Image (spheres, rainbow, N blue to C red):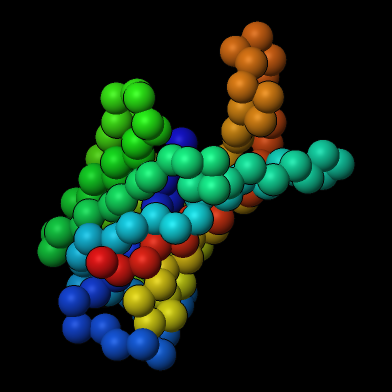
Amino acid sequence: MAVAVALLLGTGCSGDEVGPGEWTLEDLQGTWTITRLEYTADPPDEEVFDLIEEGQTATIVVDGNGNYTLTQTVQGLPPVVVTGVFSIDENGNVVDSNEAGIADITRDGDTITLRDESVTFDFDNDPETAETGADLVMEWERQ
């Protein structure tokens, strides 16, 4: 799963906006509840599936060094845990160690939104069929 993951800071207040080229690790630091984990199939299908709306819960914790732990839980199943490292490139952009390049991530107050247009998702939940190209939108709310 692309965790280009989405995240926020201990000193932020509502209305603070951070976008491409403006990030620091402090902007990502904290514990976040993922409130949207939505996949939209590439055209022509354009099917939409939000794992949070379907009952999954997820949190992401980012420490001061950019290390993160993303935990996804579905009732009755063991949690799925993904770890990685966020870093900030020389241009102030967020880079995720689990992704190939700069994360498309913005923050408005205590909400972070991450977008990734290069993921795949198993919309039909059938291991016999290939995953479908999709866009991911992940929103985090600061706890």
Q: Residue furthest left?
A: 64
**The quadrant where residue 92 appears:** bottom left
Q: Residue at x 31, y 50 (%)?
A: 59
Residue 26 location (% of width, % of height): 20, 73
**The quadrant where residue 23 appears:** bottom left
Residue 110 location (% of width, % of height): 35, 76
Q: Is residue 90 visible?
A: no
Residue in the foreground of this view, choosing between 93 and 112: 112
Q: How many marks?
A: 0
Q: Is residue 6 left or right of residue 29?
A: right
Q: Is residue 32 left or right of residue 36?
A: left
Q: Residue furthest right?
A: 44
Q: Residue at x 22, y 54 (%)?
A: 61
Q: Residue at x 43, y 80 (%)?
A: 108
Q: Is residue 94 above or below residue 120?
A: below
Q: Is residue 28 left or right of residue 6?
A: left
Q: Is residue 16 above or below residue 19?
A: below
Query: In which quadrant of the rendered image does the C terminus lie?
Result: bottom left
Residue in the foreground of this view, choosing between 114 and 102: 114
Residue 84 location (% of width, % of height): 26, 44
Q: Residue at x 49, y 47 (%)?
A: 52
Q: Is residue 130 visible?
A: yes
Residue 81 location (% of width, % of height): 28, 34
**The quadrant where residue 30 appears:** bottom left
